[in-house]
């Protein structure tokens, strides 16, 4: 084995130009493949995160923007009350959202006014303290729930008082809403939680509104969790029918189901899979054909060496294995170099990329396996050609 590896190294070392060209061509293909796998893996992870945060049995109703003033698309508190009365088996939560500035925090902070059902509906994790309860809603209690990110960002904890729109709110709980914001295509940003979010009782939203305002009773979203024992599609259709009265047309609302939530991700997966996948495929084919043509030239230049090996007892199998292993070493080295460089670059710049990136064992091992297969496939023909050379033919060539 040591002698075989020495022979392979000599074959690579004495032809640096051809080896470098093959190495470069295969490396580009492996880089493209690694990027493709990383992006598709990131989109798969994002799909899982969206479903986990939203919930497989949860959907949302939001007002649809309209350019026609005569159409009333608002969602109001009475809609939530109507659904709660007609679907007691479902968990229903109403939400209203505000943006405000808080001293000491860069940029605007999202204030989410919601009810005691929000945590159960969205299945958030309570890290510390408690969530909004019925007493907070009924008594207009100025209590606040902050996210873990907000707690880390400001160093806030339970018992501290934070000023929200010039009103003092006491922090009573810390929750973890998830690792990603949720902004489905076609909906407004009311659906997302975000990094800088503070939750308050829904009733306290009236502190910042006047009863004479037209949007005094408006909501930004209603979240509905269907019982796992119930038929999701049937319940969804029933709720649409209930909200199809003469003054609240269901078609004027935006309905966010898990399928709608993932539609944008699936379209991005298809687009990236086609574009980046085509580039990766072409790069791999180009690298393979480059390797094969260089291996053919390599065989022709080494006819004398092959004949000498045959005359000293080497079998056709030995000659074929020599060239196949030589090609595999080149492709494997190119793959390792390309994937390591790609992993390092993606780790450094992934937060600036428009698509999510997920790096794991497969983004490293799969390109390596493909490179080995590439080396075997595209060196098989030249290896057979080398194995077919006889000592007499080598002598005539010399």
Image (cartoon, rainbow, N blue to C red):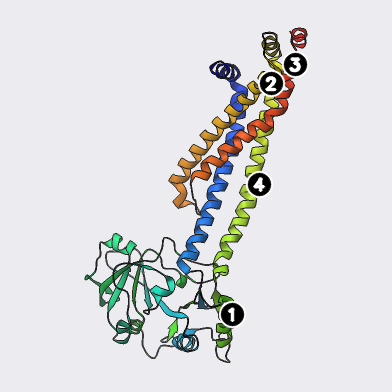
**Mark positioned earlier in the residue sequence (1 or 3):** 1
Q: Which residue is mark 3?
A: 389
Residue displayed at 63% across by 23% down: 18
- Tell us which disc is closer to us: 2 or 3: 2
Q: Quadrant of the N terminus?
A: top right
Q: Position of residue 204 (x, y in %)?
A: 32, 82
- Tell us which disc is closer to us: 3 or 4: 3
- Tell us which disc is closer to us: 1 or 4: 1
Name the mark on residue 317. 2
Residue displayed at 59% across by 56% down: 269
Q: Position of residue 116 (x, y in %)?
A: 36, 79
- Asked if marks 4 and 2 touch (Cβ < 8 Å), the reply is no
Residue 67 in view, yes or no:
no
Name the one closer to the observer, 201 or 227: 227
Name the mark on residue 278. 4
**Mark positioned earlier in the residue sequence (3 or 4):** 4
Q: Which residue is mark 1?
A: 234
Q: Position of residue 133 (x, y in %)?
A: 32, 80
Q: Quadrant of the C terminus?
A: top right
Decide: is 355 above or below 213.
Answer: above
């Amino acid at each position: 084995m040591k002698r075989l590896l020495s022979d392979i190294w000599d074959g690579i070392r004495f032809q640096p130009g051809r080896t470098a060209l093959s190495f470069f061509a295969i490396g580009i293909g492996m880089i493209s493949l690694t990027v493709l796998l990383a992006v598709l893996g990131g989109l798969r992870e994002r799909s899982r995160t969206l479903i986990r945060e939203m919930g497989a049995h949860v959907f949302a109703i939001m007002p649809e923007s309209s350019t026609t003033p005569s159409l009333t698309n608002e969602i109001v508190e009475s809609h939530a009350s109507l659904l709660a009365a007609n679907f007691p088996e479902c968990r229903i939560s109403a939400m209203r959202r505000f943006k405000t500035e808080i001293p000491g925090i860069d940029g605007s902070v999202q204030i989410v006014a919601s009810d005691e059902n929000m945590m159960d509906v969205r299945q958030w994790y309570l890290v510390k303290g408690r969530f909004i309860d019925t007493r907070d809603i009924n008594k207009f209690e100025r209590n606040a729930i902050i996210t873990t990110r907000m707690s880390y960002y400001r160093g806030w904890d339970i018992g501290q008082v934070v000023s929200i729109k010039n009103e003092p709110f006491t922090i009573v709980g810390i929750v973890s809403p998830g690792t990603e914001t949720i902004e489905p295509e076609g909906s407004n940003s009311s659906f997302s939680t975000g990094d800088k979010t503070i939750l308050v009782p829904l009733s306290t939203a009236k502190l910042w509104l006047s009863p004479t305002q037209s949007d005094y009773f408006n909501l930004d979203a209603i979240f509905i969790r269907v019982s796992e024992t119930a038929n999701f599609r049937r319940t969804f259709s029933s709720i649409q029918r209930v909200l199809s009265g003469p003054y609240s047309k269901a078609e004027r609302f935006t309905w966010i189901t898990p399928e709608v939530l993932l539609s944008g991700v699936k379209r991005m997966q298809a687009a990236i899979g086609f574009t980046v996948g085509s580039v990766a495929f072409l790069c791999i084919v180009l690298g393979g054909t480059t390797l094969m043509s260089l291996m053919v030239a390599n065989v022709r230049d080494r006819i004398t060496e092959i004949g000498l090996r045959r005359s000293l007892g080497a079998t056709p199998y030995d000659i074929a294995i020599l060239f196949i292993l030589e090609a595999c070493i080149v492709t494997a080295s190119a793959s390792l170099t390309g994937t390591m460089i790609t992993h390092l670059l993606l780790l450094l710049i992934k937060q600036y990329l428009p698509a999510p990136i997920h790096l794991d064992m497969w983004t490293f091992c799969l390109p390596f396996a493909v490179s080995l297969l590439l080396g075997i496939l595209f060196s098989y023909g030249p290896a057979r050609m080398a194995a077919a050379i006889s000592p007499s033919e080598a002598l005539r060539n010399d």
